[in-house]
Amino acid sequence: RKEVEQDPGPFNVPEGATVAFNCTYSNSASQSFFWYRQDCRKEPKLLMSVYSSGNEDGRFTAQLNRASQYISLLIRDSKLSDSATYLCVAEAGTALIFGKGTTLSVSS
Amino acid sequence: GAGVSQSPSNKVTEKGKDVELRCDPISGHTALYWYRQRLGQGLEFLIYFQGNSAPDKSGLPSDRFSAERTGESVSTLTIQRTQQEDSAVYLCASSSYLGEQYFGPGTRLTVT
């Protein structure tokens, strides 16, 4: 069965903290990986793609470990507006397999 | 430009009735997906359309669920003889590239 597993959290952190989320995927044939963000009662939105060499977009860094089938997202200098659920996503042929998400709550 | 739109935004129906949900994808996007998200749960893939190819229906939970798409435009998801466990948010997404899916706001279905 093709699955993406994430720690559901919640992760409660103060503003300015660094927080890391991890996920594992079961389909070794998956080639593409992504992180999506979903705000409460809203639709998911693409946050960033995850490349083999790791990639950074401002305060966000994504990394992929194919050998361990493991993906991570690091958020530095957390902002209140980062509070959301972060969905780890793996490609599976014609579809995307979404994890159930990790909830982040940033407080002042 | 216009994003993905879905209608209705909310639908309350009685158990046993049929419902039809509509999705208008972003113009030019060849791929269209339907997902279901139950309260507090992750996204569950239902069906995928790509151009004029046969749809991938592998995620449809039962034969009460069906979907159609006309060319590369509007899609409808039909649920026949609705059950209470069908209550969920039904999300539609379109894309021109597999990873970057643009989601509509969803239809919140409540079966009473």
Image (cartoon, coloured by chain):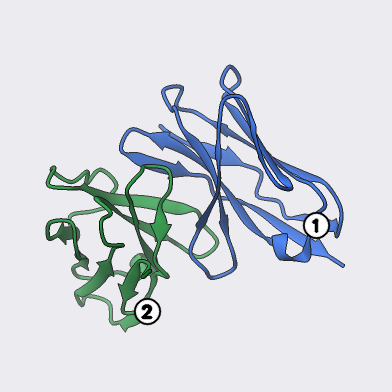
Chain colours: A blue, B green
The correct choice, above or below, for A88 with respect to A51 in the image is: below
Disc number for residue B9: 2
For disc 1, the chain is A
Residue B112 in sight in this render: no
Residue most extreme to the front: B1
Q: Quadrant of the N terminus of chain A?
A: top left
How much space separates mark 1 and mark 2, taking CA atoms?
31 Å
What amino acid type should be assigned to the residue bearing mark 2?
Ser
Q: Residue at x 61, y 24 (%)?
A: A53
Question: Could you say where residue A77 lies in the image, as x and y percent from the top left?
Answer: 83, 52
The local crowd at label 2, few if under 14, some if 14 to 19, many if 20 or more residues have their Cα within 10 Å, is some
Work out whether disc 1 and disc 2 sit on a shared chain: no
For mark 2, give the secondary structure: loop
Disc number for residue A12: 1
| The image quarter in which residue B19 lies | bottom left
For mark 1, give the secondary structure: strand
Residue A31 in sight in this render: yes
User: In front here: B4 or B79?
Assistant: B4
Q: Residue at x 28, y 82 (%)?
A: B14
Disc number for residue A1: none
What amino acid type should be assigned to the residue bearing mark 1?
Asn
Question: Could you say where residue B66 lies in the image, as x and y percent from the top left?
Answer: 18, 59
Q: Quadrant of the C terminus of chain A?
A: bottom right
User: In front here: B108 or A71?
Assistant: A71
Question: Could you say where residue B37 lies in the image, as x and y percent from the top left?
Answer: 44, 60
Say whether residue B41 is left or right of residue A63: left
